[in-house]
Image: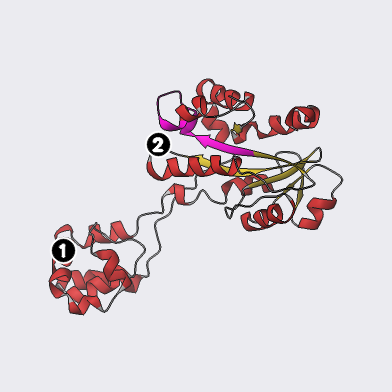
Amino acid sequence: MNYWTEKSIEIANEGAYLDRLYNIYPMANNECRNIAPDVIDTINRAIEVQDDTTLINYLLRQELFPIKDSYVAYLKRDSDAILRNPEIVNRITNKIYKIGAEEVIRRIREPKETNRQMGPLFNNWLKRGELGLNLVESETALLKSKDDCIFIGSDQAKKEFAHRYLGYNREKGLDFLARINNIYIMGEAKFLTDFGGHQNAQFDDALSTMRTKLDRTKYKVLLVSVLDGVLYIKSRNKMFTRLEDDLSDDEIVLSAVLLSDFIEDVKVNVGAYL
């Protein structure tokens, strides 16, 4: 296991890890989804008079549907099916009538989940300049800057730069791209909030990017994974097990809270990373 991975595990299990992480991944106070008053009035009226067609049509237009039902996705994608399948529609709307208008409105106005707001947070943190490096927004600036710097363009722009100059050949976007002591450092950054399913896939994806075999390039390139969250909890979960058993000593998985220390080490001990 790499030193930086060991250090990340240590901080997560012994230090005020979450307090430090919140500076990078702040969670906004989620506001309810905005639904126009006239839409709410129409939904309430349709429930009151049990107008199946109006109710189903208006609810299908919302981001959230108030109940779980396997047929809803089909109806969303083929609105003509509503009139052709009155029994299915009636079965769904009867379930909606049972929970009542107030609960229906509450459910369709529920705030977005915080994990759907994660995308820009890491890049927003980079843009605040807390790593103490020059921030550049163009390929030319990144190539010509005489100082260490971080590229703060979009994930797509980072990927295109890596394709053009650094031998990167994946279609996956990059979250982190910096030039430190004439080494280009790049990789994905993720906050893994729980175990299982989609989060495991995100973990696997970040490792795959880190392990990408680069095409030939004249530049020195270092691939890393900037990962945070539950993967550092000492347990027999899949993520921690892979950190312990699957990573070689030169594969760098580290927490974003250690990025500043890592960058300083690359500046001083550049030979250790070549």
Q: Is residue 243 visible?
A: yes
- Residue carrying label 2: 195
Mark 2 crowdedness (10 Å alpha carbons): few <14, some 14-19, many ≥20: some
Asked if the stretch drawn in magenta spans residue 238, the answer is yes
Q: Nearer the viewer, residue 115 or 111?
A: 115
Residue 247 placement (x, y as % from top left): 55, 29
Q: Are marks 1 and 2 in contact (CB under 8 Å)?
A: no
In the picture, measured across the screen, residue 200 lies left or right of residue 110, that is right
Give me the residue at 55% from left, 39% from top. Answer: 207
Disc 1 marks which residue? 97
User: What's the residue type where badge 2 is placed?
Assistant: Phe
Which residue is found at the position 50% from the left and 22% from the top?
13
On the question of residue 40 being in view, the answer is: no
Q: Which of the 4 quarters of the picture holds residue 80?
A: bottom left
Label 1 Cα crowd, 10 Å radius (few <14 / some 14-19 / many 20+): some
Q: Is 113 on the left or on the right of 23, as rendered?
A: left
Magenta range is 224-239
Task: Report x, y in % for residue 127.
Answer: 68, 48
Horizontal and vertical percent for residue 132? 75, 39
Quadrant where the N terminus lies?
Answer: top right
Residue 1 to residue 228: above or below: above
Q: Quadrant of the C terminus?
A: top right
